[in-house]
Amino acid sequence: MKVVKSLQSAIVAIAATCFTLSASAQDNTLLGAGSTFVNPLFSKIFADYAAKTDVKVNYQSIGSGGGILQLTNKTVDFGGSDAPLNAEQVKKIGVPVLHVPMASGAVVITYNIPGVTAALNLTGKDIADIYLGKITNWNSPEIAATNKGVKLPDLGIVVVHRSDGSGTSYIFTDYLTKVNPDWASKVGKASAVNWPAGLGGKGNDGVSGLVKQTPGAIGYVELIYALQNKMGFANIQNKSGKYITPTLESTTAASNVELPPNAEVSLTNTDAPKGYPISSFTWALIYKEQNYSDRSAARAKMLLSLLWYNIHDGQKNCVALNYAPLSKSAVKVAEAILKSATYNGKPIL
Amino acid sequence: MSDKNKRLDLSYSQMKWETIFKRILIVMSVIMLLLVAGTLVTLIVKSMPTIKSLGIGYLWGKVWDPVNNVYGARPFLMGTLLTSFTAIIISTPFSYAVAIYLGEYNTKGWLSNLLKNTVELIAAVPSIIYGFWALFVLVPIVRSFEMKIGVTPYGVGAFSASLVLAVMIIPYAASLGTSLIRMVPSPLKEGAYALGATRFEVIRSVILPFTRSGLFAGILLSLGRALGETMAVTILIGNTSAIGNTFKDVFFGPGNTMASVIANEFSEADHDLYYSALIELGLVLFFVTVIINLIGKRIITKYTNK
């Protein structure tokens, strides 16, 4: 009997701790989940914010798809995603969701051609043709035409893509879909597609590992990853016909265009004359109507203030961490989006 | 009186513990059974959408296209079977040799212990370490080998994955084999020696026939490990769902296995049919493992009855 009694009291004690923990978690801890890409930036911003305001944020970097699922199940206050919701996800959620831009990222084309150290100039159409398996040699006339003065060897191209589903692949295939009709009809855009050619590497490090050690390889990685690992990359021709070197500035410039009021827009193949064409926002996703599942008005206000901080003061952390900060027009649109969030139909901010 | 009562008491509590212990054992076994059954039911229920919309064609479809919702598991089924069986073929001579050497030739002493521990250590190394080691050390060697024999020098592919898998699965068959060979009754061996048999003859005609089914069970254990291995294979297989046209292309070129497709694509499977297609892949892997194990069990009973 003694054993049973002590067991009982132990269970009561554990339950009590759980209750107090969850109660305190509800008071001043916001929950988020999603994009791994934005995680380093979020960690820094949220740490600063916690020091200032006593509001803690628990962000789980489980991938964009997972973040959207958690938001759909209403287990988090916000989701992080590198791609806007697709039609099926919108249908599943059933209520309006706001896409608040948090920062911009870019995807760069990296390659390994022995003897070539100059940055290549590539057009989007040629990149798509390479990934379709139509251009198979580095000395092909299409590549030579945009790289006069560079001596390209007679070397087969080994295409390397991401094997795991990822926002990076989404941005890349979204760009190829826009610039090459053949790609659009045969492959399309998604975080994982049916790649017509080449090898798959897992993660940025898997792709860069394969590119580094395979002569003739071409691959794509996040700009951050390329900058941190000091990798070489190609200049890409944008819509205005200029060859743009991927940098934080040219990535920010890509979003400096007339944006639609919901910011649910793909920035690839941007109209901005100085913008790098393979760039994208990363978004925080929240419900437009914040009164759901017994949430308090105070909690909704807390979430909105956090995101307001992210698009203003938080932006100064971007450059140090190799993220491209939001452009002026993007900040303006993000402000309007945050102001459109409601609690019981009334604006919160 | 009281003395008698005490003894009765004792035997009562003994009986009680006996029942409790037996019940715990039963509950544990039932939980195991429920776990496996539960896994199977979950896999079937969650893969219902693709089973309904694609039917049996899922198994031999060649195209895996999440954008257009076309799913075919054949490239991955082939990849899994190809890499696993190649790995078994490469690893079996090594694991048998280790088992015979440690079980019969060198059963005691520091060399024997060192070798035994080293082989067991192979099983303890995390597979991600094998994966990256192979990517940076083995793959360049395979690539130069491929250049010499005139196939496209990708380096990564089914061949590289099989090589690493072979190393990873050696300990399973080797450890089991060592213990079994050491358990061969010495009167049998001594009898053979007394008749003038050499060591090799004893191994061939006494030890191997006596341990045949056990050694085979070890191979089966290794095969199970190879079928499900994910991380190292994902790094080395090349991850493409296109099937090569010639055997050379398939064997040396990039491919994909069921486990690595699930590992790669599951976290970002953003629509229902895609998600369900990946779970059905898990279901297929489940059945492949079960079928291979059943066949193995049949072979073992057949040999043991002889």
Image: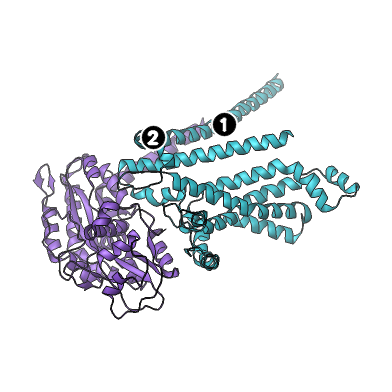
Chain colours: A purple, B cyan
Residue B49, image x, y percentages: 34, 35
Q: Nearer the viewer, residue B106 or B295?
A: B295
SS at mark 2?
loop
Tell me if I can see residue A282 in this picture.
yes
Query: What residue does disc 1 label?
Result: B24
- Residue A133 left/right relative to B248: left
The residue lying furthest to the top in this view is: B1
In the picture shown, does residue A230 fall above or below A337?
below
Q: Residue at x 47, y 63 (%)?
A: B154
Residue A299, image x, y percentages: 20, 48
Q: Earlier in the sequence, mark 2 or mark 1?
A: 1
Residue A44, image x, y percentages: 29, 63
Q: Residue at x 49, y 39 (%)?
A: B286
Q: Which mark is residue A115?
A: none
- Residue A143 left/right relative to B171: left
The Cα–Cα distance between marks 2 and 1, rounded to whole angstroms, is 42 Å
User: Tag 1: Cα neighbours inside 10 Å, few (<14), some, or many (≥20)?
Assistant: few
SS at mark 1?
helix
Q: Nearer the viewer, residue A135 or A323?
A: A135
Tag 1 subunit: B
Tag 2 subunit: B
Q: Which mark is residue B55?
A: 2
